[in-house]
Image (spheres, grey):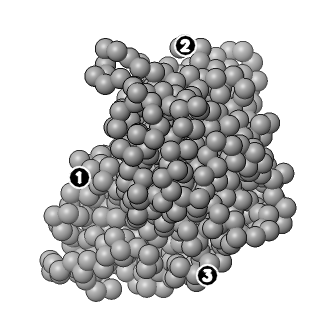
Amino acid sequence: MEKSGFSPVGLRVLVVDDDPTWLKILEKMLKKCSYEVTTCGLAREALRLLRERKDGYDIVISDVNMPDMDGFKLLEHVGLELDLPVIMMSVDGETSRVMKGVQHGACDYLLKPIRMKELKIIWQHVLRKKLQEVRDIEGCGYEGGGDWITRYDEAHFLGGGEDVSFGKKRKDFDFEKKLLQDESDPSPSSSKKARVVWSVELHQKFVNAVNQIGCDHKAGPKKILDLMNVPWLTRENVASHLQKYRLYLSRLEKGKELKCYSGGVKNMDSSPKDAEVNSGYQSPGKSSYVFSGGNSLIQKVTEIDPKPLASASLSDPNTDVIMPPKTKKTRIGFDPPISSSSAFDSLLPWNDVPETLESKPVLYENSFLQQPPLPSQSSYVANSVPSLMEEEMKSPYETPAGGSSVNVDEFLMPQDKNPSVTLQDLDPSAISNLKLQEFSSNVTNNTEAILRSLNWEIPESHHSASLDTDLDLIWLQGERFLANTGLQFQDYSSSPSLLSELSPHLWYGNERLPDPDEYSFMVDQGLFIS
Amino acid sequence: MDALISQLQRQFRDYTISLYQQGFLDDQFTELKKLQDDGSPDFVAEVLTLFFEDCVKLISNMARALDKTTGTVDFSQVGASVHQLKGSSSSVGAKRVKALCVSFKEYCEAKNYEGCVRCLQQVDIEYKALKTKLQDMFNLEKQIIQAGGRVPQVDIN
């Protein structure tokens, strides 16, 4: 492994999966990669988290199948609104599914079971996206870029200073600078046309020419070229540079508009966005999330902005700019909501849906091999000493509690000590995820949100009780298929009876009724209008 | 005491290997064990608890969906739960359960009622069998520790 000075430590990952087992495992794996992990069991909760802290995450990993919202829909939302890289996951690797992922904009599709080595390199998607955005601005062929772009990128990268996320240090910036420069460096063998290095001086000439011409849509590349009076420069060079410039200006414009909306709002949601827009070219989309903390970036950017590119006199170049469609969508789609979260929320009807997440502690302590040797709560450990083991060892660790049955309710009901333990377990990570030091009043709300999101409900758990009455009758008729497990306990009341009821010799008959398709409709359409 | 520890360790190793050989577990379980560290010494047990709870929930969903007394059988609903169980079982390396889910899913897609019912029963049996086996394995671990020994790293193949 070559020494590059770049470190993905601290990458802020949001994991969305309705499977609690996978959520726990992925969290552990991602933490082992030294990432900052936030977990979420519901898609809409994930969206809420993302929107609340627009600058709060670097990458999203989401399962494809989720009960409240199709993973692809989530993918669309995230891509459209936030422009974050999204990795899809599924146990299903069918071509059509993977294709769908690609079509909806997933930057990767992972098959479960997911391995550590796959997670170790997800940071590449974050970096790639950023580089692509820079490239989009530069136009194809890396014609420009050179000093001009790199300087602003550098400013932007450096924006965070001491408070950089994604674990960036001074030396890391050198790596990225190098990365960008390498790409914009002319390589005679690969390129047919000469690459233009848009130095600051050259760019200044360009700007002067543009200003001289005045109104933007009259400033065609030919005219600019003529005015610049740079003999070796071609019309094409100017054209592509003009394109980038317009992009930059449109962002500037938006930034100015936003400045009046957001007013004196100090919270993190709007300020990074402002900063990002103000810094124009070098921070399209969500690049600020990679390299800087929010507030300090604003300061840096406003320092640098006024210098060479101060020509805000140009009219809004929106009409003429040929922006990459995705970027354009991002920008425009964002404008109204950025100003305040309430305005944003009003666009989405599903925000009216009340929080249904119960604050049910995660049942870490209710291990399926319960430790405490309470005679009344016959633990699995006690019960499960197998007969053959007993014979061999003669000194079993756990005294068997006489084959009494274990209640499934024992698992579903947290023990007293559990809530405090689990919440304590969760608190530090929740806090570190949120970078509390950056927030003022939003802290408690966000912590609660994260905690709530981690305390996923197990929706069907209450149903087993309701089935009891229905099934008791059938239980009498059914056969006990638990007999062949070889152990005394029965771990639940409802399911065995229902299952035994389904034995072929019982009264079901052979009717086949048409598939109502309701459930799939719900899954596909999502439960919300979006 | 040392003799006891060695004996327990040997039993633990043999038992663990047998679980892999009999197809109860696959290498995902190995990966799970690797994730366990000093910071989370009960990680595997916790994950397994979540998994078995999920099994109960999902199987009960499937049973309900296959219950003809409530009306028409919704095979897509059964299929959805099967898919979830497949995902869940893949997380802990529950090899047999996962394999069952594959055929179960096919029966769902074919809307084969008897096939589904059979699969449901088998899945129920299978996850419980796995649960028992794993409990035995954890028991052995505990006994080793109680005896003052260390739980050996078992190298599968």
User: What's the mark number on residue A332?
Assistant: none
Residue A293 shows in the view: no
Q: Amino acid at mark 1?
A: Ser
Query: Residue A315 location in percent, x, y?
Result: 52, 62
Chain of the residue on which disc 2 is drawn: A
Chain of the residue on which disc 1 is drawn: A
Query: Residue A206 location in percent, x, y?
Result: 51, 40
Earlier along the polypeptide chain: callout 1 or callout 3? 1
Q: Say which residue appears at 52% left-offset and 82% top-offset.
A: A349
User: Could you say whether the residue bearing mark 2 is in a helix, strand or loop?
Assistant: loop
In depth, the one of B31 and A106 nearer the eye is A106
Q: Which residue is mark 3?
A: A354
* Quarter containing the N terminus of chain B: top right
Query: Residue A345 location in percent, x, y?
Result: 59, 77
* Quarter containing the C terminus of chain B: top left
In depth, the one of A258 and B58 nearer the eye is A258
Earlier along the polypeptide chain: callout 2 or callout 3? 2
Instruction: Measure the alpha-carbon separation of dots 1 and 3.
Output: 35 Å
Q: Is residue B106 above or below residue B19?
A: below
Q: Residues within 10 Å of mark 2 (few under 14, many from 20)?
A: few
